[in-house]
Amino acid sequence: MSPTNTENLKEHLGEAGSHLKSAASAAGGAIKGATGAATDELRIGRANVKAELSDTALSGLAAAEFGGAAAKEQVDALMDKGKDLVDSAAELIRERPLASFGVAFAAGWIIAKLARSGGDK
């Protein structure tokens, strides 16, 4: 005797239900696996971010230390240039005292005139 249509229907529905249950179980496993992988990736990413931020802070501190030394070098260079300028002016005054006195006198006179004319306004 061959199975009836109703029996065939029940058998195939039971088989479909069984496959659906297996598919749901596989999906749950895949989600758990993806969650675990994502959690691991987040941990690795967080560790990498912390390491990079730490390296950034160390580099910043090193730059700050070199910044102070660089500023001192620049100040020393400016002081040397200033000394050279004063030495050069002193040498010029020794070589040409009369001309230097005339230039200083003229500069003082011009500054005094400018100061007086600025007060009149």
Image (cartoon, rainbow, N blue to C red):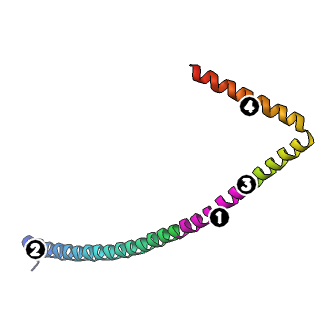
Q: Residue furthest bottom?
A: 1
Provide the major secondary structure of the magenta segment: helix
- Of the residues tagged 3 and 2, which is closer to the observer? 3
Of the numbered discs 3 and 2, the one sitting upstream in the chain is 2
* Mark 2 closeness class: few <14, some 14–19, many ≥20 residues within 10 Å: few
Q: Which mark is residue 69?
A: 1
Three-letter amino acid code of the residue under disc 1: Ala
Marks 4 and 3, how far apart at CA? 26 Å
Q: Quadrant of residue 97?
A: top right
Residue type marked 4? Gly
Return the residue at label 2.
Answer: 10
Q: Which residue is mark 3?
A: 79
Across and down, in percent, residue 117 comes to 63, 21
Label whose residue precedes the other's in the sequence (4 or 2): 2
Name which quarter of the figure residue 47 lies in.
bottom left
In the image, which is nearer the foreground, mark 1 or mark 2?
A: 1
Query: Which segment did they paint magenta?
Result: 58-76
Quarter of the picture holding the C terminus: top right
Task: Check residue 68 for magenta coloring.
Answer: yes
Q: Position of residue 56 (x, y in %)?
A: 52, 67
**4 or 2: mark nearer the eye:** 4
- Residue tagged by mark 4? 108
Q: Position of residue 63 (x, y in %)?
A: 59, 64
What residue do we see at 10% from left, 77% from top?
3
Task: Name the residue type under label 3.
Answer: Met
Kindly state the secondary structure of the residue where label 3 is placed: helix
How many marks on residues? 4
